[in-house]
């Protein structure tokens, strides 16, 4: 099997850096969605079906797909204004 890291003589460092950056982005998304969901809940316009903590956990697991679903449900024009 062809291994580009061995060919470049980089070892596992690029892969390790990729996973560190990936984990950092996932955590940042999860914290952001959790914070936004908490602010919405405190204002009375919050998540109706799922608690803010669970949105954060779902974002940590599901990544950008869950962020997109969260935005569609809570911030897009699809949500009726009260």
Image (cartoon, rainbow, N blue to C red):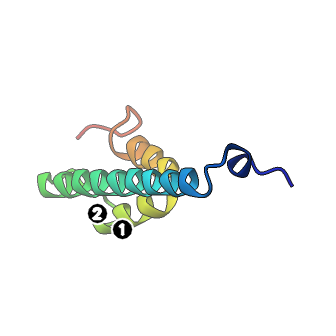
Q: As rendered, which of 27 and 70 lies closer to the eye?
A: 27
Say which residue label 2 marks: 52
Q: Secondary structure at mark 2?
A: helix
Furthest toward the left, the residue is 43
Q: What residue lies at 17% left-to-right and 53% top-to-bottom?
A: 39
Furthest toward the front, the residue is 9
Q: As rendered, which of 62 and 70 lies closer to the eye?
A: 62
Q: Are marks 1 and 2 in contact (CB under 8 Å)?
A: yes
Furthest toward the top, the residue is 77
Q: Quadrant of the C terminus?
A: top left
Q: Secondary structure at mark 1?
A: helix
> From the viewer's perspective, is 6 left or right of 30?
right
Q: What residue lies at 55% left-to-right and 50% top-to-bottom?
A: 14
Residue 62 percent location from the top left of the image: 51, 58
Residue 21 percent location from the top left of the image: 43, 51
**C-alpha separation, residue under disc 1 versus residue under disc 2:** 5 Å
Name which quarter of the figure residue 59 lies in: bottom left
Can residue 59 be seen in this snapshot? yes
Q: As rendered, which of 37 and 1 lies closer to the eye?
A: 1
Q: What residue lies at 60% left-to-right and 58% top-to-bottom?
A: 12
Q: Residues within 10 Å of mark 2 (few under 14, many from 20)?
A: many
Say which residue label 1 marks: 54
> From the viewer's perspective, is 10 left or right of 72?
right
> From the viewer's perspective, is 30 left or right of 10?
left
């Amino acid at each position: 099997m062809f291994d580009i890291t061995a060919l470049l003589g980089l070892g596992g460092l690029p892969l390790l850096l990729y996973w560190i950056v990936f984990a950092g982005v996932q955590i940042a998304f999860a914290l952001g969605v959790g914070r936004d969901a908490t602010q919405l809940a405190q204002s009375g316009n919050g998540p109706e079906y799922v608690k803010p903590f669970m949105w954060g956990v779902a974002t940590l697991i599901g990544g950008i797909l869950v962020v997109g679903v969260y935005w569609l449900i809570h911030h897009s024009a699809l949500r009726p204004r009260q």
